[in-house]
Image: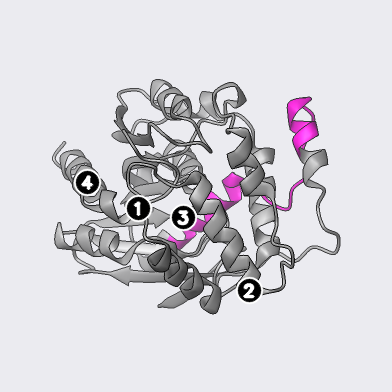
Amino acid sequence: MASVEVDGLSIEYESLGKPSDPSIVLIMGLGMQLVAWPDAFCQGLVEQGFRVIRFDNRDSGLSGKIHLEKKPNLLLAIASAWLKLPVRAPYTLNDMAGDTVGLLDALGIERAHIVGVSMGGMIAQVIAARYPQRVLSLTSIMSSSGNKAVSRSKPRALQALISQPSDPKDQDKAVEHLIRLFGVIGSPGYPTDEADLRQRIRRGMRRAYHPAGVLQQLLAIIASGDRRALLGKIAAPTLVIHGADDPLLPVAAGRDTARHIKGAKLVVIDGMGHDLPPGLLPRLVDAIAAHCAQAQSR
């Protein structure tokens, strides 16, 4: 792994595969690190002939952190958003999109396939709309357009997401908290072995642990609002993948995203929730690789 400086902020990344192959840039979701992209998924794309770049978003993993003197008020931000008032946030999805483009600049990559999951899908959408010259194709996975009317989580899933460990500073308790979270939002048709899940979560915890960043990334999502008008500007070939059984961002959010991007292809997967379970990785790799290859042939 290595890092680059983007507008004074360190961005940690890992490049897999041959630099001469077409690049796929993977953007992870809320509070998650680059290692949350399963190794088997990344290797599968490499074997399909792509260079794979995964990185830590700002405020996560080993990338730069935004330190605030005062803890933001999440409930106030949510209330302001519902009342269509300005939401105060240290940065927005536009800034995070700029981080990704800055990473491309630093690596000398003129154009890339952009793949994002959840919040990463939102960032990927912004890149495709605002930096069209840098995007070969877009894949938005279990994400949304920012349309609140179709993005309402099931109460249990929302509670699991916004709840905190009994002691956020205790990494063991944080691990158990995340296991419970994925037990709620995970894929019912593709259950993940708990021992494997625990091992992957601990791997991330040993690498870095920055709970304040989760709140600040969540504020970025809230402050960025509805992107439906922005999605209408996307010209890149687009694949939208969504789980039929996603309790955090319902499948209606995926359908809405595809509806607002001209020519987008929608793939709804039965039994998929809000995760990347081992049992689905081969299907996801094949779908994304085929989409990217078709976009290159145009």
Please report whichever mark, 1 or 4, sits nearer to the chain's N-terminal start: 1
Q: CA distance from mark 1 to mark 2?
A: 23 Å
Residue 216 placement, left or right of 280: right
Q: Which residues are magenta?
A: 78-103
Other-residue count near label 2 (Cα within 10 Å), few / some / many at <14 / 14–19 / ≥20:
some
Of the residues shown, which amino acid type is indicated by label 4?
Arg
Residue drawn at x 17%, y 43% is 290
Of the residues shown, which amino acid type is indicated by label 2?
Gln
Magenta stretch, main secondary structure class: helix
State the SS at label 4: helix
Residue drawn at x 43%, y 78% is 2
Other-residue count near label 4 (Cα within 10 Å), few / some / many at <14 / 14–19 / ≥20:
few
As drawn, 289 above or below 244: below
Residue 47 placement, left or right of 111: left
Q: CA distance from mark 3 to mark 4?
A: 19 Å
Please report whichever mark, 1 or 2, sits nearer to the chain's N-terminal start: 2
**Residue projecting furthest to the right:** 70
Please report whichever mark, 1 or 3, sits nearer to the chain's N-terminal start: 3
The stretch drawn in magenta includes residue 261: no
Q: CA distance from mark 2 to mark 4?
A: 33 Å
Give the residue pinned by disc 1.
277
- Would you say the residues marked 3 and 4 are in contact, meaning their CB atoms lie under 8 Å apart? no
Give the residue pinned by disc 4.
283
As drawn, 87 above or below 213: above
Which numbered marker is on residue 28? Answer: 3
Of the residues shown, which amino acid type is indicated by label 3?
Met
Give the residue pinned by disc 2.
171
Q: Position of residue 223 (x, y in %)?
A: 69, 39
Q: Nearer the viewer, residue 199 or 211?
A: 199
